[in-house]
Image: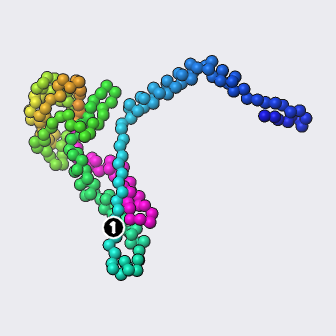
Amino acid sequence: MEQQVNGNANVQQDIDYVKILKIVLSRWYWVASTIIISLIVAYIYLWYTPETFSTSASLKFEEKRSEISELLNVRNVYDRNNKIQSEQFVIRSRQVLNNAIGDLDYKISFYLKGRVRTSDIYPQKPLDIAIIEQDSLDFATNLFEYEPISPNSFKLSHQENGKEITNEYHQGDIIAVRGIKFKINNNTFNKNNAIYCFKFNTKNAFLGRIAGGLSMAETKGTNILTL
C-alpha cells in the first residue's frame, strides 16, 4: 500500500505475513495453553450446568362456517384472532396445566448424587417406592438421600426442622415422615455404589415451572398456534 507523505514522496508499506506467522509460531505455547484453558473452562461449565430440554407443537383450529359464509367465502379475521386468543387463555388455565402435570407421573422425582452435582434422572425410577398414606395438603417435600448398606437394608437421610435425620431401614419397612407413609420395595446394592435421592412433589410445585416456560405465538393469517 502506498501513502503520500507531505505531498511529495511515496512510502511503500507491505504487511509481511510470513514474519507474523513466525512470531505466532515462536509463541506457540501461549496459543496452546489458551486453547486448553478455554476447553477446560467450557467442560466445567457444561458439567455444572443442569440440562435443559424443550418441546414444541403446532395446534390448528378448525373454523365452523355457515353455508352462507362458505358460498360467499367470507372470512372474519377478527373472529379468528379472538378465537385463538381465547384458546391461549384456556391452555394457560390452572385446570389444563394441572391435567398436563398429572400425565407426567409427577409424584416422585429421582436424582443421582455425584461428587460434583446432583442430577435429575427423570424418567428413570431406580427405586420402587409405594406411597401407602399421604396428606393431600401437608406432607414432606424435602430431599431424601438413599444409600444402600446391604442387599436388604439401606440408610435414609433427610432434613427436618433444620436438623438432619438419618435412620436405617430394611426393604419393605413402612417409613413414616410428616404427612406421608411409604415403603421402598427394592434395593440398589451393588449397582456401582450409586447414591440416589428422591422427593415427593405436589402439582402446585410444577405450575410455576410450566407457566414460566410456556410460550405461544400465532402464525399470521392462519389458524395455527405454535406452542
Region rendered in magenta: 199-227
With 109 as the anchor, is 179 left or right in this view? left
Quarter occupied by residue 71? bottom left
Answer yes or no: is residue 175 visible.
no
Residue appearing at x 33%, y 80% in the figure: 67
Q: Reply above or below: 34 against 220.
A: above
Q: Using a 10 Å C-alpha cutoff, classify the residue at mark 1 as few (fewer than 14 neighbours), some (14 to 19) or many (20 or more).
A: few
With 17 as the anchor, is 94 left or right in this view? left
Q: Reply above or below: 210 against 2.
A: below
- Kindly identify which residue carries mark 1: 62
Q: Position of residue 202 (x, y in %)?
A: 22, 46
Residue 175 located within the stretch drawn in magenta = no
Q: Reply above or below: 160 against 27.
A: below
Q: Where is residue 188 in the image (x, y as percent from the top left)?
A: 17, 28
Question: Extreme front residue here?
Answer: 71
Secondary structure under tag 1 reads loop
Q: Position of residue 123 (x, y in %)?
A: 25, 40
Residue appearing at x 78%, y 34% in the figure: 1
| Figure label count | 1
Residue appearing at x 41%, y 61% in the figure: 218
Image quarter (top left, top right, bottom left or bottom right) of the C terminus: bottom left
Quarter occupied by residue 165? top left
Which three-letter amino acid code belongs to the residue tagged 1?
Glu
With 222 as the anchor, is 35 left or right in this view? right
Answer yes or no: is residue 10 visible.
yes
Question: Extreme left residue here?
Answer: 173
